[in-house]
Image (cartoon, grey):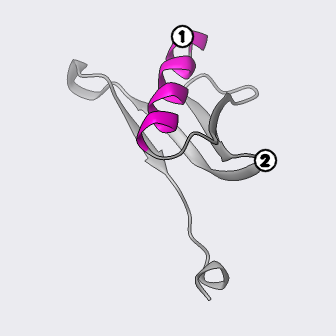
Amino acid sequence: MKPEEIKKLDAYFKRTFNPEMIVKARPRKNDSAEVYMGEEFLGVVYIDDEDGDRSYNFSMAILDVDLG
């Protein structure tokens, strides 16, 4: 993922969800970025270029132990 895309996603997550969210590049991966709340890993944002329309998918796992 290009640095300018990461900056735009970072601004979007901060504005939409929480100012403490951070989007970071992933080592050795160029189709996605990692999302953190402060230092806690939340999930991954993937690029979706299917059908010529560029979009981004955010994937976040929620563990059962985190719900209780």
Residue 25 drawn above or below residue 39: above
Q: Residue at x 54, y 10 (%)?
A: 4
Based on the picture, tell me whether residue 12 belongs to the magenta stretch.
yes
Amino acid bearing label 1: Glu
Q: Please state which of the two labelled residues, at mark 1 or mark 2, is closer to the viewer.
A: 2
Residue 44 percent coordinates (x, y): 57, 44
Q: Which quadrant of the figure has residue 6? A: top right
Q: Which quadrant of the figure has residue 15? A: top left
Front residue of 9/2: it is: 9
Task: Give the main secondary structure, helix, strand or loop, of the magenta stretch.
Answer: helix
Q: Which residues are magenta?
A: 2-16
Based on the picture, tell me whether residue 4 belongs to the magenta stretch.
yes
Residue 67 percent coordinates (x, y): 58, 82
Residue 48 drawn above or below residue 38: above
Amino acid bearing label 2: Glu
Q: Quadrant of the N terminus?
A: top right
Q: Earlier in the sequence, mark 1 or mark 2?
A: 1
Q: CA distance from mark 1 to mark 2?
A: 22 Å
Residue 12 percent coordinates (x, y): 44, 31
Residue 65 percent coordinates (x, y): 67, 84
Q: Which residue is mark 2?
A: 39
